[in-house]
Structure formats: C-alpha cells, structure tokens
Image: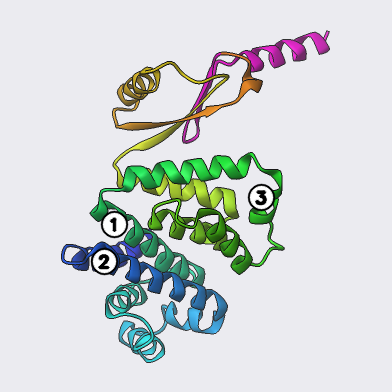
Amino acid sequence: MTGRESIEAGREALESQAANASAGDLIDTADNLMAVTRFLLDQPRLRRALSDPAQRADDREGLARRVLEGKIGASALDVVIALVRSRWGSPGELANGVETVGVQALLQASAKEGSLATVEDELFRFRRIVDGDPELSSVLGSTGTEETVKVQIVDRLLDGKTDPVTVKLIETACHGVGGRSFDPSMEHLLNATAEAREQVLAYVTVASTLEEGAEQKIAAKLSLVYNYPVGVKVIVDPSVVGGIRIQVGSDLWDGTVSRRLNAARRVLAGR
C-alpha cells in the first residue's frame, strides 16, 4: 500500500462522516487533525511507533487510542485510526497524511457552505499581498520566526475580513504544509482548493488590468486545451511591459514583451 492509498483510507473515514456533519462539525474535526499533526511532529518516538510496519495494525490502533482518546473528538479519532492502521513508508508520511485529511475537512466544510470559490479567491489575494510586502513576506517565510507568531500576525491581519476557512488554511500554511515554507504551502493549498472545485489553476500575468470578459475567454480557451475546467488567477505586473504570460502547473507560455526584450539583450550581449 502506497502513501497515497493510505491517505485514501483517512479520506474515506472522513467522507463517511461528512454527509451528516455540519460545516462547524467538519471545522472541529479539521482543528483536531491539525492538532494531532503538530503533536506527531513534536513526538518522533510516537510517530515512529504509530507508523511501524513491524507492529500489528491492532497494536498501532491501541496505542493511538490510549494516547488520543478523550483528547480529540470521536470523528477526528476515527480518521486517525484509519490512517494509523494503514502502511506508511516513513513516520513523516503519517503526519503528512493526518494533515492532508485535515485540509480536506476544511475544504469540505467550505463546500457545505458554498464558499469554495470565495476561499480560493481569498487565498490568492492574500498570497499576492504577502508577495507585495517584503517585510511581511520575510516574517512569514522565515524559519526563524516562531509558527505561533506567524499565526498571530495572520489572525490580526484577517480578523473579520475573510471566510473562517480561509483563515484556518492560511494558519496551516504558517506551520508549513508537508514541511514546505509559507509560499509553497499557500500554492499547495490554492491547488487543493481548486481541485476541490474540480478545476486546475492558471496564473495569467499581464501588464495592466484585462478588459471585461477577457478572463472568461482565457479560461474557456485553456479548458479546451487541457480538456478540463481551468480557473484563471490574474496577476497585474507592469514590469512585463506588454503581452501575456500563462502558467498552468509546470507548463509555461511566455509571450510578454519583457521576455522578448531580455532575449534580445542576451543576443546582443553575445555578439
């Protein structure tokens, strides 16, 4: 069983609860799963014991129950038990698996409220704000800044201004998703949100604001190219001068004036 298959066991446990759970219930489950993730990361011996393939699944489950029962909700415990009973390639994979299902619980809560599109847009806008503020980017991206301090900064900035799920996802990015730093964590969460909406994201960089309807036309054309729904996030960057740059995953089309000028400079410099 691969790590991906093991995560599916946790997702299935979450799915079995989600139909009858409220958005608030799912957020509570997510909070519990994120707390377990932090606990496992702080307890390497426990993490190893709960993912040890040499131990019987029943023994790993028994240990998890002894440690966690009464400390987290029953729904979160069911998810953790499903994950602990699965096989993992390394102890770190187990912690990442718990975190992954925690993110899924938040996205399912957002889906219940019909706010996934709002959450996706708010994640993108906050990432752009951080990118445009060198001091804030340095603090949130620094490994020298305590994670609790990062969370406090985010909470002060976003208090009452965004969807609660948006705040919780950005708090998760402050801790680092799967060991990533802040910005890659935000990108990962944006992609996960788009996946929950059954889309992929295209980042479109232009020199000035697009004309009305242009974003929808780009999305429609890219959806035909990929044969899959594509959501467009527009980045206005005057430094590109003109033209358009489109990035979808690892695919990049760069038709900007700045790229052509840079190419011309390289050619002239080589003469």
From which residue to which does the magenta span run?
243-271
Residue 231 visible in the current orientation: yes
Would you name the residue on which mark 2 appears?
14
Query: Label 2: how many residues lie within 10 Å, few (<14), some (14-19) or many (20+)?
Result: many
Would you name the residue on which mark 1 appears?
108
Q: Secondary structure at mark 2?
A: helix
Q: Is residue 70 above or below residue 6?
A: below
State the CA–CA distance, disc 3 to disc 2: 35 Å
Query: Amino acid type of disc 2?
Result: Leu
Q: Secondary structure at mark 3?
A: helix
Question: Do the CB atoms of the residues marked 1 and 2 lie less than 8 Å apart?
Answer: yes
- Residue 45 at x, y percent in the picture: 54, 84
Position of 114 compared to 209: left or right? left
Q: Is residue 213 magenta?
A: no
Residue 164 location, quadrant? bottom left
Q: Secondary structure at mark 1?
A: helix
- Which quadrant holds the C terminus? top right
In front here: 85 or 253? Answer: 253
Say which residue appears at 49% left-offset and 79% top-offset.
47
Query: Label 1: how many residues lie within 10 Å, few (<14), some (14-19) or many (20+)?
Result: many
Would you name the residue on which mark 3 appears?
136
